[in-house]
Image: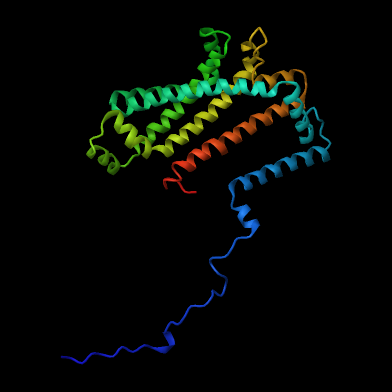
Amino acid sequence: MAARQEIVVRPEIEVGELGKAVTGDIARPLTMFERLSNMDIVRKFTVLLVVLAAWELYTRTSGVSELILPTFSATAKALVSAIFNESLLEMLWNSVKILLTGYLIGLVIAAVLTTFATVTRFGSDVLSTLTAMLNPLPAIALLPLAMIWIGLTSGSIVFTLLHSVIWPVALNAHTGFRSVSDTQRMVGRNYGLWGFSYVIKVLIPAALPSILIGMRIGWAFAWRTLIAAELVFGGAVIDTSGANKGGLGWFVFSNQMESQVPAVFAGLLTIIVVGLLVENIIFNTLENRTIRRWGMQSQ
């Protein structure tokens, strides 16, 4: 047998024990500032504070009239006064009730249309044609027609909200379904899934990122349409008994007619706050518990 060769280790490249890193350790406790800066809500709140501070500073130093741009402090004072003296919270709840009604019904209709478009070719043709026709049409343009058909009630606004919700949700969901990979589709087929069970157990989980995007867009469109409808026709759908005092849009419009500019900005600020809460609490929580938790979207 051939003699076994001796392994020679060159001492100049032999690796000994590793010491601490020269430029710093990888694992180290984060400072309080670093922990706070890593929190998404803290960063967004900081941006909001900077905007409000710039608003207050500009209005106090520029000499602009409060009939054009009131200070933030005056707007905050008008907001507190509206909450306790002008039933702003009741008006907000009136708007939210109409919004939820139109949004939820719109989601159901969009789900039916998308499912029909997924399981049949004719349904796909129907959805694509209706989306191409109606999606570019502004929802607020349907409000006069809705008031002729339904009358001077909140139902006419709900009808308008349906148009704002159905098409973006259905379009994004259908696009998400069509983007599901062939591998995932074949897995569902191999398990014997067909029809509605195939949609629910395979397509919806795989297309959930697109569905959530459609829900976000539908919510934003519905919220804007609701405020615009209340601004234009809000007074027409108020109950003659006075039980319904209108919504946020009517609050802004009525104060504009009385030249109460701080109250107008208070109403606009309320609209913005509601939008921020829905985006950062409801939709972000939904994403964190689904697509981000499942690794379908980066943090």
Q: How is the image coloured?
A: rainbow
Task: Name the residue furthest left.
Answer: 1
Q: Work out whether 65 lies above or below 21.
A: above
Asked whether residue 125 is in view, the answer is yes
User: Residue, x 78% and y 21% (percent of image)?
Assistant: 259
The image position of residue 273, as x and y in percent, is 64, 33
Using the image as rendered, state which of residue 121 and residue 89 is in the foreground: 89
Left or right of 212: which side holds 8?
left
The image position of residue 169, as x and y in percent, is 44, 29
The tally of labels here is 0
Using the image as rendered, state which of residue 168 and residue 187 is in the foreground: 187
Q: Work out whether 148 lies above or below 284.
A: above
User: Residue, x 38% and y 36% (percent of image)?
Assistant: 176
The image position of residue 296, as x and y in percent, is 42, 45
User: Residue, x 35% and y 22% (percent of image)?
Assistant: 126
Left or right of 61: which side holds 19?
left
The image position of residue 215, as x and y in percent, is 48, 32
Using the image as rendered, state which of residue 53 and residue 247 is in the foreground: 247
Using the image as rendered, state which of residue 283 and residue 262 is in the foreground: 283
Task: Name the residue furthest bottom.
Answer: 3
Asked which quadrant contains residue 117, the reply is top left
Asked whether residue 128 is in view, the answer is no
Q: Work out whether 186 lies above or below 104.
A: below
Is the N terminus in the top left, top right, bottom left or bottom right quadrant?
bottom left
User: Residue, x 57% and y 21% (percent of image)?
Assistant: 97
